[in-house]
Amino acid sequence: MLILMKKSATPEQINAVCDRVREIGFTPHEIPGSIRVAVGITGNSGAVSPENFMHLEGVAECVPVSNPYKLVSREVKPDPTVVNVGDVSIGDGSSLALIAGPCSVESRDQIFRTAEAVARSGAKLLRGGAFKPRTSPYAFQGLKEDGLKLLDEVRREFDLRIVTEVKDTETLDAVADVADILQIGARNMQNFSLLEACGHLRKPVLLKRGISATLKELFMAAEYLLSLGNYEVILCERGIRTFETMTRNTFDLSAVVMIKHHTHLPVIADPSHGVGVNWAVPPLARAAVVAGADGVMVEVHPEPGKALSDGQQSLTLDEYRKLATELTELAAWQSDHG
Amino acid sequence: MLILMKKSATPEQINAVCDRVREIGFTPHEIPGSIRVAVGITGNSGAVSPENFMHLEGVAECVPVSNPYKLVSREVKPDPTVVNVGDVSIGDGSSLALIAGPCSVESRDQIFRTAEAVARSGAKLLRGGAFKPRTSPYAFQGLKEDGLKLLDEVRREFDLRIVTEVKDTETLDAVADVADILQIGARNMQNFSLLEACGHLRKPVLLKRGISATLKELFMAAEYLLSLGNYEVILCERGIRTFETMTRNTFDLSAVVMIKHHTHLPVIADPSHGVGVNWAVPPLARAAVVAGADGVMVEVHPEPGKALSDGQQSLTLDEYRKLATELTELAAWQSDHG
Amino acid sequence: MLILMKKSATPEQINAVCDRVREIGFTPHEIPGSIRVAVGITGNSGAVSPENFMHLEGVAECVPVSNPYKLVSREVKPDPTVVNVGDVSIGDGSSLALIAGPCSVESRDQIFRTAEAVARSGAKLLRGGAFKPRTSPYAFQGLKEDGLKLLDEVRREFDLRIVTEVKDTETLDAVADVADILQIGARNMQNFSLLEACGHLRKPVLLKRGISATLKELFMAAEYLLSLGNYEVILCERGIRTFETMTRNTFDLSAVVMIKHHTHLPVIADPSHGVGVNWAVPPLARAAVVAGADGVMVEVHPEPGKALSDGQQSLTLDEYRKLATELTELAAWQSDHG
Amino acid sequence: MLILMKKSATPEQINAVCDRVREIGFTPHEIPGSIRVAVGITGNSGAVSPENFMHLEGVAECVPVSNPYKLVSREVKPDPTVVNVGDVSIGDGSSLALIAGPCSVESRDQIFRTAEAVARSGAKLLRGGAFKPRTSPYAFQGLKEDGLKLLDEVRREFDLRIVTEVKDTETLDAVADVADILQIGARNMQNFSLLEACGHLRKPVLLKRGISATLKELFMAAEYLLSLGNYEVILCERGIRTFETMTRNTFDLSAVVMIKHHTHLPVIADPSHGVGVNWAVPPLARAAVVAGADGVMVEVHPEPGKALSDGQQSLTLDEYRKLATELTELAAWQSDHG
């Protein structure tokens, strides 16, 4: 259920509605809109009667919400959510967020060279993993705290905002100190304890779709974050698992279209993980822009052949520079037509 | 094995090579290139020795082919194949083939109104099914011969080339009389008897990827056509089956990129079947263009709500007109950058 | 809609109901049951009013059918269908049909040795392909007519019933002359022209589930056969395509349980194609029996290492003999408990 | 690399080998076998030279390990691992572990009634969740600590061993205090921080296959546990995600066969989650036994219609009693033939 307040509703009237929601045992969520405020209700398993609220002052309308996802839904909040990080606006419909960087921070030299090139290409967001979840216990698991320190240095040096993965609640505080955007990886999309911990933070979260997650499950995972008060959530399509073996995953570009339609959250495309081979990344990155993605995240490396992880899907610094220019051109086209 | 002839090789020298291939029990395939001719060998299960050919005059080099698909492979023919239909060139890298029309031909009025709008939008290829394979024996199976007659009429009336599906060998002759491009549907991608019959024709074939076909299987199905001498083959991505239920299929745009990379055949994207909801078709159609598709096929209907099949994924005639303009703009961009 | 006749209904009364169905433009299907006859109606897209029939003599009840599959449904015919081939009863709930043989008939020696061993193991049905649909145009496509002749010979020599695949309408008559059960392969499950041709025959059909067919689609494919009057249909689970690569397909044993529950048709399990490695076939064959399969089809070969197709998933003749004994024991257990 | 010690090797000789492994920078794993000890080496990314060890006393042979999973592999330890919990032996090849209970502990009455029935059916292991990971933040998340207390009570009252899920590192100690077997759920199969925490415990772990995990990924997840010294690992097949919608998941019984073949770990089948409808659970449970599963875990509930989670896939107490008898009979058959 969604309670739409009148345009003229006062803060006191809104509070009174929230109090009434709590009184009958549920949780109110104040959702600001461009012209008026709405109050979402969660905690109810069945329908809630509008009669509880219709008589309260300032209430315009009570609207049932048909989806299991509530707070992420466009039904509940028609205006798109814009996440601001430094001077980057993600989801505003007119600018394209460019995120680039290596899979893992590997060395001072590697991350400095990459960060410099990324900054010069016009991208303002640097990705790079310090704590890496890996399928094998014997594989490189990241530089950990040392990686975080390097990220912190390049942030200042090149005025970049940092996107880096948090893999567990134990290291969340350390990662959150450095990250401007906390990335929750595909394998952790349904790590509900981690989602809850990030829901209590007030810091943007980039939530990746699980490797075989339905879109509805992705929306429900995001709902964990919003229901705890963290509304700065960005969704990310990074490919799903199918029977096809010529690509690493199947990059599901329709997810971008569905996310924009069914939710108000910004969406980032990650074609590097989606397809898994570097020469296929640029065409899919271009495609993501004209399909309506709010940003594109690409893996780059000064020497892909020597990368400790994901080298085969990383662009060189020069390849990225060329791609960034193309994406910016297409974003301008898309902003005029989309 | 691929035998590359010298630039200066004479027709007689090429014939001598083909004769030698037959002599040792295999099948030669002459493959014309922009600068020189190659001769492909099929029918061998293992390796063929280059010694059989190196001493023949006009032979430059013998190259082993590592893939199970031979004649469709870029290894064997690096130049892209261009399929010409009327004054439309599909696969030439500079023009975009626009194909539009209803799922099924339903009535004279419906197909005439659609054809007129399609022609006015600038598209030169009209799609429309007369024989419809349907999951249920009780569903509308098309107007059959009457549908073919209507397609023949609109072709002349609006100077359109016709793309229509052939569903079995029994009706192949009748369909081929009207079709400028024969469509082989997803369910028939591995109907080998139909592939063989179409391989003996000299008419373009649009081969759709099966609903859970790997790309390698798609390439092998095309190989059936080429191995029988029909080189005018166009591949088509139309979505694959996955666990996701919010979309009809999962539109696999990376297939477009893989097809262009691994084969020399043109590729058409069909986002209508790929996603299955009409409002999601335009963004995915745009995406296909900048990912490198040689054409885009879209379902349109004068009154989608009344369509006998696929109404929910059909654009109105007005929506298509707008989309066609956008796609043409992006194709110009892509031709400059791609 | 299903019209249930009274136990005492006369043939004339049943005919009168069928005539009435035709009068209002639909198709009647007489469905004999153990205690009374029912008349199914197809050809209607929406609901048919019971008022058309309730006043006719001999009519007991009119029951709406909720599924898109009608004639195959347990709703319509609660009694299981039993397909009799020679002295083998498939689907009677007390005997287990054992089908064994090579993927392809390869030579006189191969098929005679196999047939002898199969007959001695107690199996009464021999499988073997004469016309083989193959992914590659360059792969062995079967001995064709010569293969059929060999199957005809071993049938007489060893008193076996023959299960062999029909791959197209062109060769259907030739195959039907030899086959006791016509197999329609996974790739042809939605070859509707072939289904229609087999629907007009009065000969048992073994219909394999398509490689990524849903169960509902399998039921609809069977509906093509039944709607044309061929009620002797046996369904076959042979594995579906998933992301797992350690097995050839994913053998979906729950399909056996679902088929028995939702339809009245017998079901055969094919673990050889399901898993694709010979040492894994016996445990899955055993499993199929206690899950309720009416029969088990297994690939066997005198020398699996030399098979022209599917050698890696074929049992030796000795391995099959041992397995047949185990399956018979478990079938006895299942018949007591299932 | 695996270093096989002579049968006569002394503890000192084994220690000397382990010391040498550490000396060259890797990690030794002593693996006891029925006739002799082996020492596995991990931490190396490439090959390790046998020359480091062949001269040491007591060393019989150095064997390269070809799989990315080392310690879980049958190559490394041909003898099956047997996990003992109370007087239950899981994986000994002759007894069948019966695990039953509700999805969630819901109330004192519910868990006592269930536990009593489970104990009377002959099962010695009770499952029941206290901490429940749920797709929706608004769904019932379990009784948490109160649920653990109830499990502790029924354990004593009915002399049952407890299998219960641990969902995060924060609650691991509390859960481990009550659990005889710690269950790691499908969504946490690649929660590497949780795997590491459980790897440091010396308590049996039941590791469920992720919803779209390949078997190789399941083996690598188990490798996390073994590489940290916890060898008491039981794998569990619970269905994978496919395109089929008639069942909740696709129960992949071939996984049981593959696990027994490629690893030395015991395997439990969970048909309840695999198929998702209660009437389909018994046939699939029977199938799992004759396919070689070491145990079967089934959801039961005194009143499935009133269950707070998974009611539709739960058996009644009476249905379970009947099933337990059948499974025991088939296990006896399997122990003789398998």
Image (tube, coloured by chain):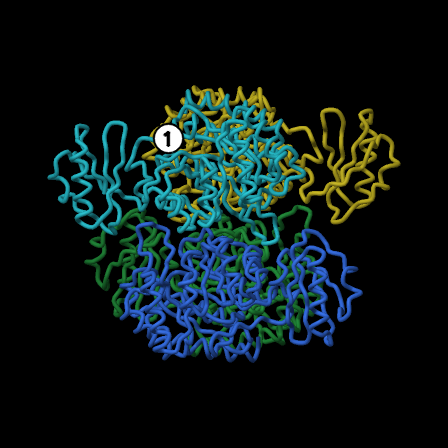
Chain colours: A cyan, B yellow, C green, D blue
Q: Quadrant of the N terminus of chain A?
A: top left
Q: Amino acid at mark 1?
A: Val
Q: How many marks?
A: 1
How far from the left and from the top, in percent, is residue C55? 19, 58
Image quadrant assignment for residue C315: bottom right
Q: Nearer the viewer, residue D270 or B181?
A: D270
Q: Is residue D7 above or below residue A100?
A: below
Please state if C242 lies on the left or on the right of D67 as rendered. Answer: left
Q: Nearer the viewer, residue C185 or A198?
A: A198
Image quadrant assignment for residue D178: bottom left
Q: Quadrant of the C terminus of chain A?
A: top left
For image coordinates 44% across by 70% down, the residue present is: D180
Judged from this view, the residue extending furthest toward the right is B55
Q: Nearer the viewer, residue B219 or D324?
A: D324
Image quadrant assignment for residue C91: bottom left
The 10 Å Cα crowd at callout 1, few under 14, some 14 to 19, many 20 or more, is many
Query: Can residue D215 be spotted in the picture?
Result: yes
For image coordinates 73% across by 76% down, the residue present is: D8
Q: Is residue D100 above or below residue A185?
A: below
Q: Chain of mark 1?
A: A
How far from the left and from the top, in percent, is residue B25? 79, 46
Q: Secondary structure at mark 1?
A: loop
Query: Can residue B173 be spotted in the picture?
Result: no
Please state if A43 lies on the left or on the right of A12 as rendered. Answer: right
Q: Which residue is mark 1?
A: A82
Q: Nearer the viewer, residue C169 or A105?
A: A105
How far from the left and from the top, in percent, is residue D276? 39, 60
Q: Is residue D267 above or below residue A258?
A: below
Please state if B85 lies on the left or on the right of A178 as rendered. Answer: right
How far from the left and from the top, in percent, is residue B337? 58, 22
